[in-house]
Image: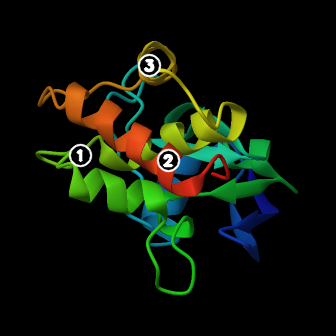
């Protein structure tokens, strides 16, 4: 059923008129042109489609757009401020924590949520916190290093 859905997207109020049961992933990518959020498995396993809804990581491939009515949604594009990359985005580049880059947006969004809850995670806490995001290229050690570096740079303020 076509509905008018409004929510905050990357800090700005937005309104879309779409089928409310359409997955948020496709509204973001197709209707709004925010292609940073990736389609991976479509079943909520890989984490490539992770976005923040009210500062919590969710799988946009399994979240309907009506589920975000009046909520705050942040995509990978929304982490940068005033043209300046977020420290996590910088750290992933600096530590070469990506190869193909496909999983990277979901990894960064999940790491952002992790650092908000635990600004000074240990290596084991990072591994546990990032466990549900899959990287087929196997850059896990560099991902952990990037999250550690971002935690240090932000001094506990994700």
Report the disc number at residue 132: 3
Task: Give coordinates of residue 47: x percent, y percent.
Answer: 42, 31
The one of 50 and 139 positioned closer to us in this rendering? 139
Q: Residues within 10 Å of mark 1 (few under 14, many from 20)?
A: some
Q: What element carries label 1?
A: loop
Instruction: Please say whether residue 64 is visible from this viewpoint.
Output: yes
Q: How crowded is mark 2: few (under 14 residues within 10 Å), some or many (20 or more)?
A: some
User: At x 59% / y 48%, what residue is drawn?
Assistant: 24
Task: Give coordinates of residue 158: x percent, y percent.
Answer: 63, 51
> Which tag, 1 or 3, sits closer to the chain's start?
1
- Please name which of the two marks, 2 or 3, marks the residue nearer to the observer: 2
Q: Is residue 10 left or right of residue 37?
A: right
**The furthest residue to the bottom:** 82
> Which tag, 1 or 2, sits closer to the chain's start?
1
Q: In this view, does 92 lie to the left or right of 16?
A: left
Q: Is residue 82 shown above or below 17?
A: below
The one of 146 and 111 positioned closer to us in this rendering? 146
Instruction: Please say whether residue 36 is visible from this viewpoint.
Output: no
Residues marked 2 and 3 touching at CB (< 8 Å): no
Task: Give coordinates of residue 18: x percent, y percent.
Answer: 67, 61
Q: Is residue 34 shown above or below 61?
A: below
In the rendered view, how is the structure colored? Answer: rainbow
Q: In this view, does 140 lie to the left or right of 26?
A: left
Report the disc number at residue 152: 2
Give the Cα separation between the discs numbered 2 and 3: 23 Å
Q: Name the residue under label 1.
A: 102
The one of 90 and 43 positioned closer to us in this rendering? 90
Q: What element carries label 2?
A: helix
Residues marked 1 and 3 touching at CB (< 8 Å): no
- Please name which of the two marks, 1 or 2, marks the residue nearer to the observer: 2
């Amino acid at each position: 059923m076509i509905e008018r859905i409004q929510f905050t997207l990357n800090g700005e109020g937005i309104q879309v008129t779409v089928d409310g049961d359409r997955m948020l992933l496709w509204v973001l990518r197709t209707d709004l042109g925010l292609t940073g959020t990736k389609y991976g498995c479509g079943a909520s396993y890989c984490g490539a489609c992770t976005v923040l809804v009210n500062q919590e990581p969710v799988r946009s491939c399994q979240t309907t757009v009506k589920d975000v009515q009046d909520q705050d949604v942040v995509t990978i594009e929304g982490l940068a401020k005033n043209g300046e990359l977020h420290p996590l985005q910088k750290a992933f580049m600096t530590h070469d924590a990506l190869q193909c880059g496909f999983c990277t947006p979901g990894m960064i969004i999940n790491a952002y949520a992790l650092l908000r809850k635990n600004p000074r995670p240990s290596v084991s806490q990072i591994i546990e916190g990032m466990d549900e995001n899959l990287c087929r290229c196997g850059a896990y050690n560099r991902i952990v290093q990037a999250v550690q570096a971002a935690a240090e740079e932000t001094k506990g303020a994700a």
